[in-house]
Amino acid sequence: MKYASIVARLRSSGLSLPASRLTRLFAGAIITAIAVTAAIPAAVSQASGRSAISRPLPRAFFGLGPANKTRIDGRPFFNWGSSPGGHFTDHVAIVNFGATAVTLHVFASNAAITTNGTTSFLPPGKSVGGPTSWITIHFPNNSAFLHLAPRTKVILKITVTIPKNAPPGDHEGAVIAALTSVIQSKHHFKVHFVQQVADRIITRITGKPNPSLSVVDMHVSYHDPVNPIATAPATVSFVVKNNGNELLGGKATVSVQGLLGSTETAKVPLTVPILQPGASDQLTATVTGVYPEFWMTAKVSIQPLVVEGYVDTGLTTYGGQAGFFAVPWIPFGIVILLIAGALATWLRRRRRRRASALPSPTRSRGRALVDN
């Protein structure tokens, strides 16, 4: 189902929020719900080893976003700045768009680095330290489970206390709203179906900034052409690592330079996603039109990009390089054979000249007899 039709259905059900606000704050919630719904049959099949769901999946539309005391304020995410030991408050709005009541579990979570370098958020109870330990969400009746009637919203107060020993730099987390339903397959297997949406929290702690990216583990694959004046593509793979204490990404330009001065650049720059401190991402680019000039140098240059709304000082261009051989082996082998043949011919002629210059053994004996 397309997003426009979903908005139309929400409006026909009596929702009065403007479409621009729906798009800005809650499109992610709706898209997430649809994506998880599509993945559930496969999950059920794996869990049971049999067929998928027999009853329709629950239709729930909900979202969350930054707010002030009375209304949603339009911020795309929670963007906080503080010095160590700081204390401040904020608010989050939880909205039920649907025509049925929902009970949502609302909690704060820390960001985690996945194996491929992307950002995920930990499940409830798994976060230790960081933004989760700094945040207190004030719930009605002191319960983290909110019961929302159809087409209603609730605004919760958030209290943030930064510890005095908080390290400088960016710290990422999220406020998450989760809905858990029980789905039953036609073979009576029950599966917990979880729909959840998150709004990022980025907290920048004042102190010494250290934005830094490094390019490591560069590898180049180049298939030498048979024709010495032909070109071949060079595939450059590398890892970009965030060595600093700020969220940082960039645009990576990959080029290959030859010993004789030629330079070729990949047609499309690569996007380095915004990486958490300590995170890394592996990228690959193909540079076409590379002439084999024996010794080549692959170079990566990264123009840094920061999180929208942030201004960073001390940014520079980051990069790395790696050398590799690019040799047209068949022509090169022919040249080597010609040189080897010429050298062998010269050595044979030299040996012959030396042999002809030596005195004959028979003549030497004859002169000796005459002298006696």
Image: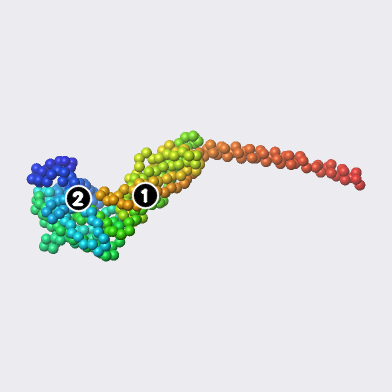
Q: Nearer the viewer, residue 288 or 92?
A: 92
Q: Which of pointers 2 and 1 indicates the residue nearer the eye?
A: 1
Q: Indicate left or right for 334 with 60 as reference.
A: right
**x, y (%) of residue 290?**
44, 38
User: Amino acid under label 1?
Assistant: Thr
Which secondary structure lies at badge 2?
A: loop
**x, y (%) of residue 115?**
32, 54
| Residue 112 picture quarter | bottom left
Category of crowding for the residue at label 1, using alpha-carbon neighbours closer than 10 angstroms: few (below 14), some (14–19), many (at least 20): few
Q: Earlier in the sequence, mark 2 or mark 1?
A: 2
Residue drawn 39% across the image and 50% down it:
215
Category of crowding for the residue at label 2, using alpha-carbon neighbours closer than 10 angstroms: few (below 14), some (14–19), many (at least 20): few
**x, y (%) of residue 351?**
71, 41
- From the image, tell me which residue sits under label 1: 316
Taking 282 as reference, is 207 above or below it? below
* CB-based contact (under 8 Å), mark 2 and mark 1: no
Q: Indicate left or right for 121 with 370 as reference.
A: left
Extreme residue toward the bottom, this view: 164
Residue drawn 21% across the image and 52% down it:
77
Residue drawn 21% across the image and 47% down it:
35
User: Amino acid under label 2?
Assistant: Arg
Which secondary structure lies at badge 1?
A: loop
Q: Nearer the viewer, residue 25 or 187?
A: 25
Res. 42 in view: yes
- Residue 75's disc is 2
**x, y (%) of residue 114?**
30, 54
Between the C-alphas of marks 2 and 1, the distance is: 29 Å
Extreme residue toward the front, this view: 313
Res. 238 in view: no
